[in-house]
Amino acid sequence: MGNNILSNFSDTYTQSGIGLNIPKFYNISNTSTSLVSDFVSKYRKVGFYAQANLEYNKMLYLSLTGRYDGSSLLAADKQYYPYGSAGLGFVFSELMNKSSAFSYGKVRISYSSVGNDNIPVYSTSTPYVLGSAISINHVNFPYNGSNGARLTNVQGNPNLKNESLNEFEIGTELKFLNNRLSFEGSYFNRESKDLLSQIPINPSSGFYIK
């Protein structure tokens, strides 16, 4: 059992200038107009996990894992999500008489679910961006001593929840002739649900991505 905490803080400061007062003197203090932007983001993820492995008579094997994560990237009522796995193995050759022809036989079955929140920060909202950070309608701000703001071109989704990858697998392992010849085969089915991905949309909506 255990837990972990991931906390990320980012502060991106950008400064640029337009127009040189003294030609060929490339210094930000020599510009007639100075543009400054500052982007600050915070993100935190906490997780609690547990694992158990059980064995009976070198024949039955049971493996269990569980995890409960919480992420600030997701919607407020969907920030916490559980996932885990379970696997069972049965060495049926332990019930058989020892033979050089058939050395080992095992069947296994497992199911796992993995959660993910791999999205940019503040994807649940559509914030405003100051004109000093980008131009608005090809006009750089401040303009005539006044700043401006517009919505970012990425449309937020206030209902974001975690995506999950679910997988079922069944397989067998066989060995013959004192382990000189072996065979292993498996079948699995993998399914992704609630996939988190940014997609392009019609710019006439006022946004380019959602």
Image (cartoon, rainbow, N blue to C red):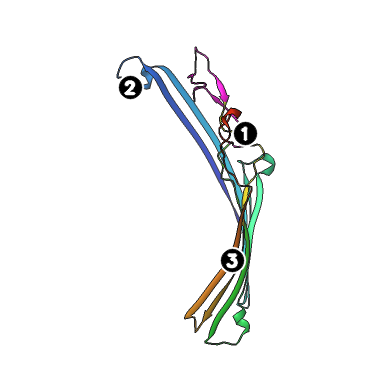
* Lateral position of residue 149 relative to residue 161, left or right: left
Q: Name the residue under label 2.
A: 26
What is the C-alpha distance between the residues marked 1 and 3?
A: 41 Å
Q: What numbered label is drawn on residue 125?
A: 1
Q: In which quarter of the image is the N terminus?
A: bottom right
Are the two marked residues, 3 and 2, in contact with CB atoms closer than 8 angstroms? Answer: no
Q: Which amino acid does label 1 sit on?
A: Ser
The location of residue 164, given as percent across then percent down, is 62, 51
First in sequence: mark 1 vs mark 3? 1
- The span shown in magenta is 122-150
Relative to 169, residue 117 above or below: above
Q: Which amino acid does label 2 sit on?
A: Tyr
For label 3, the residue is 187
Query: Is residue 161 depicted above or below 178 in this figure?
Result: above
Give the number of callouts.
3
Q: Is residue 64 visible?
A: no
